[in-house]
Image: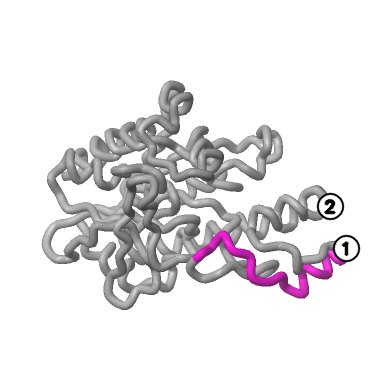
Amino acid sequence: MKHETLDSAGISYGTCRYGNSKLFFRGPKKSLEGKYLTFIGGTETYGKFIPRPFPQMIEDMMGTTCVNFGAVNASIDAFLHETVVQNAAKKAEVNVVQVMGAHNMSNRFYTVHPRRNDRFVRASSVLRAIYPEVDFTEVCFTRHLLTRLYKVSPERFEIIREELQQAWRARMKGFLQDVGKNTLLLWFSDHLPTDAHWADRPDPLSSDPLFITRSMIDELRPIVRSVVLVQPSAKARANNTTDMIVPEGQAVAAKAMLGVRAHKEAAEALTQSIRSGF
Protein backbone atom coordinates (compact mmCIF):
# COMPACT_ATOMS: atom_id res chain seq x y z
CA MET A 1 0.00 0.00 0.00
CA LYS A 2 1.88 3.04 -1.24
CA HIS A 3 -0.53 5.60 0.18
CA GLU A 4 -3.20 5.39 2.80
CA THR A 5 -5.17 8.59 2.40
CA LEU A 6 -8.83 8.87 3.32
CA ASP A 7 -9.67 12.14 1.59
CA SER A 8 -13.39 11.39 1.67
CA ALA A 9 -13.20 11.17 5.45
CA GLY A 10 -10.97 14.21 5.82
CA ILE A 11 -7.85 12.44 7.07
CA SER A 12 -4.48 11.97 5.40
CA TYR A 13 -1.83 9.73 6.92
CA GLY A 14 0.95 11.47 4.98
CA THR A 15 2.64 8.12 4.39
CA CYS A 16 6.39 8.29 3.91
CA ARG A 17 9.51 6.15 3.66
CA TYR A 18 12.91 6.51 5.31
CA GLY A 19 16.06 5.76 3.34
CA ASN A 20 15.86 2.51 1.41
CA SER A 21 13.17 1.00 3.63
CA LYS A 22 10.41 -0.80 1.76
CA LEU A 23 7.89 -0.01 4.49
CA PHE A 24 5.57 2.99 4.37
CA PHE A 25 5.11 4.75 7.70
CA ARG A 26 2.79 7.38 9.16
CA GLY A 27 3.88 10.89 8.28
CA PRO A 28 4.86 13.62 8.43
CA LYS A 29 8.42 12.47 7.73
CA LYS A 30 10.86 13.45 10.46
CA SER A 31 14.57 14.13 10.51
CA LEU A 32 16.78 11.34 11.84
CA GLU A 33 19.42 13.86 12.88
CA GLY A 34 19.78 15.33 16.35
CA LYS A 35 17.60 14.34 19.30
CA TYR A 36 14.58 12.18 18.62
CA LEU A 37 12.48 9.28 19.95
CA THR A 38 11.35 6.32 17.86
CA PHE A 39 8.07 4.44 18.04
CA ILE A 40 8.05 0.98 16.49
CA GLY A 41 4.84 -1.02 16.28
CA GLY A 42 1.70 -2.04 14.48
CA THR A 43 -1.71 -0.57 13.76
CA GLU A 44 -2.02 1.17 17.15
CA THR A 45 1.34 2.92 16.82
CA TYR A 46 0.49 3.91 13.25
CA GLY A 47 -2.80 5.30 14.50
CA LYS A 48 -5.32 4.20 11.90
CA PHE A 49 -8.42 6.45 12.05
CA ILE A 50 -6.67 8.56 14.73
CA PRO A 51 -5.99 12.21 13.73
CA ARG A 52 -2.97 12.44 16.06
CA PRO A 53 -1.81 9.06 17.43
CA PHE A 54 0.12 8.74 20.68
CA PRO A 55 3.60 9.35 19.13
CA GLN A 56 2.41 12.75 17.90
CA MET A 57 0.77 13.49 21.25
CA ILE A 58 4.06 12.72 22.99
CA GLU A 59 5.90 15.04 20.62
CA ASP A 60 3.47 17.80 21.63
CA MET A 61 3.93 17.04 25.34
CA MET A 62 7.72 16.76 25.32
CA GLY A 63 8.75 19.06 22.49
CA THR A 64 11.05 16.33 21.16
CA THR A 65 10.91 14.91 17.64
CA CYS A 66 9.01 11.63 17.61
CA VAL A 67 9.49 9.33 14.63
CA ASN A 68 6.51 7.07 13.99
CA PHE A 69 7.69 3.73 12.61
CA GLY A 70 4.28 2.15 13.05
CA ALA A 71 2.95 0.00 10.21
CA VAL A 72 -0.61 -1.30 9.83
CA ASN A 73 -0.93 -4.97 10.81
CA ALA A 74 2.80 -5.27 11.38
CA SER A 75 4.45 -7.90 13.53
CA ILE A 76 8.04 -7.87 14.72
CA ASP A 77 8.81 -9.62 11.39
CA ALA A 78 8.31 -6.35 9.54
CA PHE A 79 11.25 -4.75 11.36
CA LEU A 80 13.76 -7.57 11.71
CA HIS A 81 15.50 -6.81 8.42
CA GLU A 82 14.75 -3.08 8.23
CA THR A 83 18.23 -1.64 8.77
CA VAL A 84 16.94 1.93 8.44
CA VAL A 85 14.61 1.40 11.42
CA GLN A 86 17.22 -0.46 13.45
CA ASN A 87 19.94 2.14 12.83
CA ALA A 88 17.54 4.96 13.72
CA ALA A 89 16.58 3.15 16.93
CA LYS A 90 20.22 2.70 17.93
CA LYS A 91 20.76 6.48 17.71
CA ALA A 92 17.49 7.50 19.38
CA GLU A 93 17.25 8.96 22.86
CA VAL A 94 14.54 6.41 23.67
CA ASN A 95 12.73 3.74 21.68
CA VAL A 96 9.17 2.66 22.31
CA VAL A 97 8.46 -0.81 20.93
CA GLN A 98 4.86 -1.93 20.92
CA VAL A 99 4.03 -5.51 21.86
CA MET A 100 2.61 -6.93 18.63
CA GLY A 101 0.82 -10.26 18.27
CA ALA A 102 2.49 -13.56 17.40
CA HIS A 103 0.09 -14.55 14.62
CA ASN A 104 1.40 -12.27 11.84
CA MET A 105 4.87 -13.84 11.69
CA SER A 106 6.33 -16.36 9.28
CA ASN A 107 7.12 -19.64 11.02
CA ARG A 108 7.69 -23.31 10.26
CA PHE A 109 3.97 -23.78 9.60
CA TYR A 110 3.12 -20.83 7.33
CA THR A 111 4.60 -17.80 5.58
CA VAL A 112 3.27 -14.23 5.71
CA HIS A 113 3.87 -11.29 3.39
CA PRO A 114 7.15 -9.60 4.42
CA ARG A 115 5.58 -6.15 4.73
CA ARG A 116 1.81 -6.68 5.01
CA ASN A 117 2.21 -9.23 7.75
CA ASP A 118 -1.48 -10.05 8.12
CA ARG A 119 -1.44 -11.57 4.61
CA PHE A 120 -1.15 -15.36 4.50
CA VAL A 121 1.13 -16.46 1.65
CA ARG A 122 1.51 -20.23 1.90
CA ALA A 123 1.26 -23.23 4.19
CA SER A 124 4.32 -25.40 4.77
CA SER A 125 4.37 -29.12 4.08
CA VAL A 126 4.43 -29.64 7.86
CA LEU A 127 1.17 -27.72 8.35
CA ARG A 128 -0.44 -29.56 5.44
CA ALA A 129 0.52 -32.84 7.08
CA ILE A 130 -0.98 -31.76 10.43
CA TYR A 131 -4.18 -30.50 8.76
CA PRO A 132 -4.66 -32.65 5.63
CA GLU A 133 -8.37 -31.83 5.48
CA VAL A 134 -7.87 -28.04 5.17
CA ASP A 135 -7.93 -26.32 1.75
CA PHE A 136 -5.41 -23.48 2.15
CA THR A 137 -6.11 -21.99 -1.27
CA GLU A 138 -9.17 -20.24 0.18
CA VAL A 139 -7.22 -18.47 2.93
CA CYS A 140 -5.98 -14.88 2.54
CA PHE A 141 -5.33 -13.61 6.07
CA THR A 142 -3.56 -15.05 9.11
CA ARG A 143 -6.48 -14.67 11.50
CA HIS A 144 -8.76 -16.37 8.99
CA LEU A 145 -6.22 -19.19 8.80
CA LEU A 146 -5.98 -19.61 12.55
CA THR A 147 -9.74 -19.46 13.05
CA ARG A 148 -10.18 -22.23 10.51
CA LEU A 149 -7.45 -24.40 12.02
CA TYR A 150 -8.86 -23.99 15.52
CA LYS A 151 -12.37 -24.95 14.41
CA VAL A 152 -11.08 -28.07 12.67
CA SER A 153 -9.04 -29.26 15.66
CA PRO A 154 -8.44 -27.34 18.91
CA GLU A 155 -6.09 -30.14 20.00
CA ARG A 156 -3.83 -29.93 16.94
CA PHE A 157 -4.04 -26.14 17.08
CA GLU A 158 -2.00 -26.10 20.30
CA ILE A 159 1.05 -27.19 18.24
CA ILE A 160 0.62 -24.06 16.07
CA ARG A 161 0.11 -21.77 19.06
CA GLU A 162 3.23 -23.05 20.82
CA GLU A 163 5.33 -22.55 17.68
CA LEU A 164 4.12 -18.97 17.29
CA GLN A 165 4.90 -18.14 20.90
CA GLN A 166 8.40 -19.60 20.68
CA ALA A 167 9.11 -17.72 17.45
CA TRP A 168 7.86 -14.48 19.02
CA ARG A 169 10.09 -14.91 22.07
CA ALA A 170 13.20 -15.46 19.96
CA ARG A 171 12.57 -12.61 17.53
CA MET A 172 11.60 -10.05 20.15
CA LYS A 173 14.68 -10.87 22.21
CA GLY A 174 16.92 -10.57 19.18
CA PHE A 175 15.38 -7.28 18.04
CA LEU A 176 15.43 -5.64 21.47
CA GLN A 177 19.02 -6.70 22.12
CA ASP A 178 20.02 -5.27 18.75
CA VAL A 179 18.45 -1.82 19.18
CA GLY A 180 19.74 -1.37 22.72
CA LYS A 181 18.49 -1.30 26.28
CA ASN A 182 17.24 2.30 26.22
CA THR A 183 13.88 0.94 25.09
CA LEU A 184 10.41 0.98 26.59
CA LEU A 185 8.24 -2.02 25.80
CA LEU A 186 4.63 -0.91 25.38
CA TRP A 187 1.63 -3.13 26.05
CA PHE A 188 -1.36 -1.23 24.62
CA SER A 189 -4.56 -3.26 24.69
CA ASP A 190 -8.07 -3.39 26.10
CA HIS A 191 -6.85 -5.98 28.62
CA LEU A 192 -3.72 -6.53 30.67
CA PRO A 193 -1.38 -9.44 29.95
CA THR A 194 -2.25 -12.65 31.72
CA ASP A 195 -1.06 -16.23 31.94
CA ALA A 196 -4.62 -17.55 31.82
CA HIS A 197 -5.23 -19.92 28.93
CA TRP A 198 -5.71 -17.89 25.76
CA ALA A 199 -8.84 -19.80 24.75
CA ASP A 200 -10.64 -18.82 27.98
CA ARG A 201 -11.24 -15.30 26.66
CA PRO A 202 -14.49 -14.53 24.82
CA ASP A 203 -13.82 -14.76 21.08
CA PRO A 204 -10.15 -15.53 21.84
CA LEU A 205 -8.78 -15.32 18.30
CA SER A 206 -9.90 -11.70 18.00
CA SER A 207 -7.82 -10.69 21.03
CA ASP A 208 -4.76 -8.46 20.56
CA PRO A 209 -1.86 -8.86 20.95
CA LEU A 210 -2.70 -12.45 20.11
CA PHE A 211 -1.04 -15.29 22.10
CA ILE A 212 1.17 -12.95 24.17
CA THR A 213 1.18 -13.81 27.89
CA ARG A 214 2.40 -12.04 31.01
CA SER A 215 5.25 -14.56 31.33
CA MET A 216 6.39 -13.75 27.78
CA ILE A 217 6.47 -10.05 28.64
CA ASP A 218 8.35 -10.72 31.88
CA GLU A 219 11.06 -12.61 29.96
CA LEU A 220 11.86 -9.37 28.13
CA ARG A 221 12.12 -7.11 31.18
CA PRO A 222 15.89 -7.68 31.69
CA ILE A 223 16.69 -6.39 28.20
CA VAL A 224 14.58 -3.19 28.19
CA ARG A 225 14.56 -0.10 30.36
CA SER A 226 11.00 -0.68 31.44
CA VAL A 227 7.66 -2.19 30.46
CA VAL A 228 4.71 0.21 30.20
CA LEU A 229 1.33 -1.47 30.56
CA VAL A 230 -1.53 0.60 29.18
CA GLN A 231 -5.05 -0.71 29.51
CA PRO A 232 -7.32 2.19 28.53
CA SER A 233 -9.93 3.22 31.06
CA ALA A 234 -13.49 1.98 30.88
CA LYS A 235 -14.57 5.40 29.60
CA ALA A 236 -11.98 5.29 26.83
CA ARG A 237 -13.06 1.80 25.81
CA ALA A 238 -16.76 2.70 25.90
CA ASN A 239 -16.32 5.73 23.63
CA ASN A 240 -13.58 4.40 21.42
CA THR A 241 -14.80 5.90 18.12
CA THR A 242 -15.33 9.41 19.49
CA ASP A 243 -13.12 11.88 17.57
CA MET A 244 -11.92 9.14 15.21
CA ILE A 245 -12.11 9.96 11.51
CA VAL A 246 -13.65 6.91 9.89
CA PRO A 247 -14.44 6.56 6.18
CA GLU A 248 -17.77 5.14 5.06
CA GLY A 249 -17.88 1.38 5.28
CA GLN A 250 -15.17 1.03 7.94
CA ALA A 251 -17.17 1.70 11.10
CA VAL A 252 -17.01 -1.94 12.23
CA ALA A 253 -13.21 -2.02 11.88
CA ALA A 254 -12.88 1.28 13.75
CA LYS A 255 -15.06 0.10 16.63
CA ALA A 256 -12.66 -2.80 17.23
CA MET A 257 -9.70 -0.42 17.64
CA LEU A 258 -8.46 1.73 20.48
CA GLY A 259 -9.70 5.28 20.14
CA VAL A 260 -8.44 8.83 20.62
CA ARG A 261 -8.97 8.86 24.39
CA ALA A 262 -7.04 5.58 24.67
CA HIS A 263 -4.17 7.11 22.68
CA LYS A 264 -4.16 10.07 25.05
CA GLU A 265 -3.89 7.75 28.05
CA ALA A 266 -1.04 5.86 26.36
CA ALA A 267 0.74 9.13 25.59
CA GLU A 268 0.48 10.26 29.21
CA ALA A 269 1.77 6.96 30.58
CA LEU A 270 4.67 6.84 28.12
CA THR A 271 5.61 10.49 28.65
CA GLN A 272 5.86 9.89 32.40
CA SER A 273 8.05 6.84 31.85
CA ILE A 274 10.26 8.57 29.27
CA ARG A 275 10.81 11.62 31.47
CA SER A 276 11.74 9.45 34.43
CA GLY A 277 14.79 8.30 32.50
CA PHE A 278 16.04 11.73 31.38
- Is residue 221 something one can see in this rendering? no
Q: Secondary structure at mark 1?
A: loop
Which of the labelled discs sits on residue 133, or is there none? Answer: 1
Q: Position of residue 5 (x, y in %)?
A: 37, 56
Judged left or right of residue 247, residue 33 is left
Taking the view exactly as shown, the residue that stands out farthest to the front is 8
The structure residue drawn at horizontal position 44% and vertical position 26%, both measured from the top left corner, is 239
Picture coordinates of residue 92, whole percent (x, y): 22, 59
In the rendered image, residue 42, in percent from the top left (x then y), is placed at: 44, 53
**Residue 152 — which label?**
2
Q: Secondary structure at mark 2?
A: helix
- The residues colored magenta run 116-133
Residue 144 appears at what percent x and percent y?
69, 54
Amino acid bearing label 1: Glu
Kindly tell me whether residue 76 is visible in this rendering: yes
- Measured along the vertical axis of the image, is residue 234 above or below residue 274? above
In the rendered view, does 7 fall on the left or right side of 130? left
